[in-house]
Image (cartoon, helix red, strand yellow):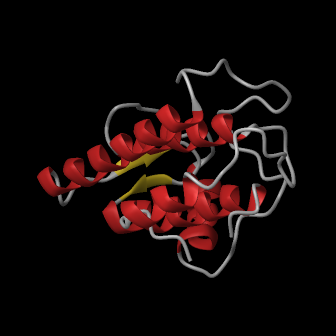
């Protein structure tokens, strides 16, 4: 089980990830995966905004399955805002810098909701999520990518 709120444990796991580790599925490198997690975390901490990319009905169904069930993201799942065949340019200078940036974005996420406890923030595919829903989403999303690199 992943707990994004336990950042010391999260960092401990991530710092064991070799920069040249090949994924069990997908095309991401370890650093791309970490930067991807940080970018998605930016949606939940107010740094990045998005419109809903799906219909209200579709996002409500997806939210019900992903947030309110034991469903785990499967290999091959595609985010509606990410290119399928190309990797974005890396933003951080190293894998360790990317891990530090991810931790910083998670800290901003917690601070954002400490200051705005009743706020709901748009997820591009799931619609408006509150703090608890974002934690559930992030835990499942992180677990998906940790499985991608055999960290869990």
Picture quadrant where residue 84 is located: top right
Picture quadrant where residue 89 is located: top right
Relative image position of residue 80 (x, y in whole percent)? 68, 39
Relative image position of residue 64 (x, y in whole percent)? 57, 71
Residue 145 seen in render: yes
Picture quadrant where residue 22 is located: top right
Position above or below: 56 against 84: below
Camera-side residue of 97 and 148: 97
Relative image position of residue 87 (x, y in whole percent)? 75, 26
Camera-side residue of 93 and 138: 93
Residue 51 seen in render: no
Identified at 49% across, 40% down, the residue is 38
Q: Which corner quadrant holds the C terminus?
A: bottom right
Q: Residue furthest bottom?
A: 70
Position above or below: 62 against 71: above
Relative image position of residue 66 (x, y in whole percent)? 61, 68
Identified at 22% across, 47% down, the residue is 112
Camera-side residue of 47 and 93: 93
Camera-side residue of 146 and 49: 146
């Amino acid at each position: 089980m992943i707990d994004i709120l336990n950042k010391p444990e999260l960092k401990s796991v991530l710092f064991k990830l070799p920069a040249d580790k090949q994924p069990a599925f997908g095309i991401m490198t370890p650093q791309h995966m970490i930067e991807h997690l940080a970018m998605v975390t930016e949606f939940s901490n107010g740094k990045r905004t998005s419109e809903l990319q799906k219909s209200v009905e579709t996002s409500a169904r997806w939210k019900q399955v992903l947030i309110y069930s034991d469903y785990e993201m499967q290999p091959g799942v595609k985010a509606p805002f990410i290119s399928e065949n190309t990797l974005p340019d890396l933003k951080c200078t190293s894998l360790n810098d990317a891990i530090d940036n991810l931790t910083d974005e998670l800290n901003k996420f917690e601070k954002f909701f400490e200051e705005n406890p009743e706020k709901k923030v748009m997820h591009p595919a799931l619609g408006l999520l509150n703090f608890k829903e974002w934690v559930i989403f992030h835990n499942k999303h992180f677990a998906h990518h940790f499985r991608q690199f055999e960290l869990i």
